[in-house]
């Protein structure tokens, strides 16, 4: 009996050791691939492409794909558009899709992608926008220091607002419109996604580097400029400037809303910002980068926003806002579209090349004037 039990005990022990050994081998074989993530130097953030990524009428991405030789494709099924990269230079291009929600989701998904290392990457948003004719002409390129969100607000229908109110659209947590003389410091709460300040030194460096670049101009643009006879800057040929960005998912247009955009920007920047460009996505992009910054996946001080004017954000004299919007939404489209796309690449790529040329310096410390 004892010999039989001993034999069973030995057999059981041998079997147990065999199972443990197999388990150990299984653990060893299942270790993740040790390939290091790809270090990205610059991420070019665009928002839309019209058709194909090359060879047809371009959107925001196409000129970047060709000009920077972004020929290596990385599947990105959990976002709007696949990623393309020049693995030799370290430049990556992404198309987020239009609107704050898509931009936020796309940048967050990209920043958390284990295939890439964005710890030292610069982020360049390069997209078209409506421009305030008081500040610039179509085809111009504006570097932003402030990004202001135009969606986070209270609203009362215009048919129900009190007679003494100037508007029915006013900041969250306030109970009435802000007086024109007051700014963000007077709000009863701290900004919570309504405004972001970019690295002002980086913005100034990018502007200084590109301010003298000659931008493309076309006959249709000159014809439209003449209609804005009350605005000296609107009649200038395209140029590079500094000017801030207001992001709102509603495509707004018109003289009254243009005044709102200026007032809203001054309010949330405590009087320091100046509204120039109207877009949709940039506060969403910046919010995602803020979150990624907290966990060391991105550096919020390496973000640049370059918007270029495809159209004016309000109508010229002699037209209503509705009439002007209808004309620009027709077959002719925006008179400044082609120039704006070219300006975004010409100005933006100048900065990208400068970063790459002195990467041994800028990988460690962002440039400043």
Image (cartoon, grey):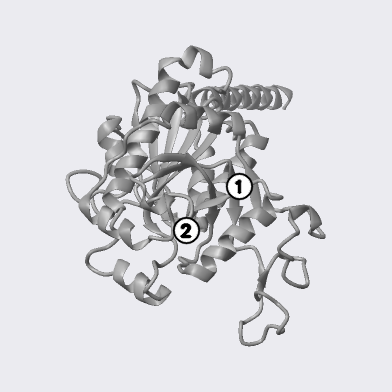
Q: Residues within 10 Å of mark 2 (few under 14, many from 20)?
A: many
Q: Looking at this view, name the residue that lies furthest to the top.
A: 360
Q: How many marks?
A: 2
The residue to which callout 1 is attached is 287
Locate the N terminus by quadrant.
Answer: top right
Locate the C terminus by quadrant.
Answer: top right
Is residue 74 visible in this depiction of the protein?
Answer: no
Q: Quadrant of residue 112?
A: top right
Residue 85 point in image, percent of width and height: 35, 32
Residue 192 point in image, percent of width and height: 71, 53
Q: Is disc 2 placed on a helix, strand or loop?
A: loop
Q: Looking at this view, name the residue that lies furthest to the left.
A: 55
Residue 176 vertical placement versus 244 (above, below): below
Residue 70 point in image, percent of width and height: 30, 32
Question: Are dots 2 and 1 in contact, CB under 8 Å?
Answer: no
Q: Is disc 1 placed on a helix, strand or loop?
A: helix
Residue 125 point in image, percent of width and height: 46, 41
Residue 98 vertical placement versus 65 (above, below): below
The residue to which callout 2 is attached is 99
Left or right of 56 in this view: 144: right
| 259 vs 11, nearest the viewer | 259
Residue at x 35% of width, y 71% of height: 324
Residue 355 vertical placement versus 247 (above, below): above
């Amino acid at each position: 009996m004892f010999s039989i039990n001993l034999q069973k005990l030995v057999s059981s022990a041998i079997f147990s050791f065999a199972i443990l050994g197999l388990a150990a081998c299984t653990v060893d074989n299942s270790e993740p691939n040790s390939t290091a993530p790809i270090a990205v130097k610059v991420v070019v953030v665009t928002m839309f492409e019209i058709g194909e990524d090359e060879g047809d009428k371009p959107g925001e991405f196409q000129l970047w794909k060709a000009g920077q030789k972004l020929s290596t494709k990385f599947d990105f099924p959990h976002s709007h558009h696949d990623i393309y990269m020049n693995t030799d230079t370290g430049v990556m291009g992404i198309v987020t899709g239009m609107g704050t929600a898509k931009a936020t989701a796309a940048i967050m998904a990209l920043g958390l992608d284990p295939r890439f290392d964005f710890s030292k990457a610069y982020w360049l948003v390069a997209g078209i926008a409506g421009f305030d004719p008081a500040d610039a002409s179509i085809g111009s390129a504006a570097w932003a220091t402030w990004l202001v969100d135009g969606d986070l607000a209270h609203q009362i229908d215009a048919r129900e607002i009190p007679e003494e109110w100037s508007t029915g659209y006013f900041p969250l947590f306030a109970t009435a419109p802000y007086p024109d003389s007051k700014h963000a410091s007077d709000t009863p709460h701290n900004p919570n996604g309504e405004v972001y300040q970019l690295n002002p030194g980086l913005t100034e460096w990018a502007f200084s580097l590109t301010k003298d670049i000659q931008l493309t101009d076309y006959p249709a643009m000159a014809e439209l400029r003449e209609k804005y006879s009350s605005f000296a800057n609107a009649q200038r040929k395209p140029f590079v400037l500094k000017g801030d960005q207001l992001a709102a998912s509603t495509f707004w247009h018109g003289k009254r809303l243009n005044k709102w955009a200026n007032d809203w920007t001054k309010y949330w920047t405590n009087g320091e910002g100046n509204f120039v460009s109207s877009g949709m996505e940039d506060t969403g992009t910046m919010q995602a980068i803020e979150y990624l910054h907290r966990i060391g996946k991105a550096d919020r001080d390496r973000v640049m926003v370059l918007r270029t004017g495809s159209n004016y954000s309000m109508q010229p004299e002699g037209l209503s806002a509705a009439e002007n919007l209808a004309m620009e939404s027709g077959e002719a489209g925006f008179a400044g579209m082609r120039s704006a796309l070219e300006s975004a690449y010409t100005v933006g790529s100048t900065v990208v090349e400068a970063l790459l040329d002195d990467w041994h310096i800028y990988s460690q410390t962002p440039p400043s004037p």
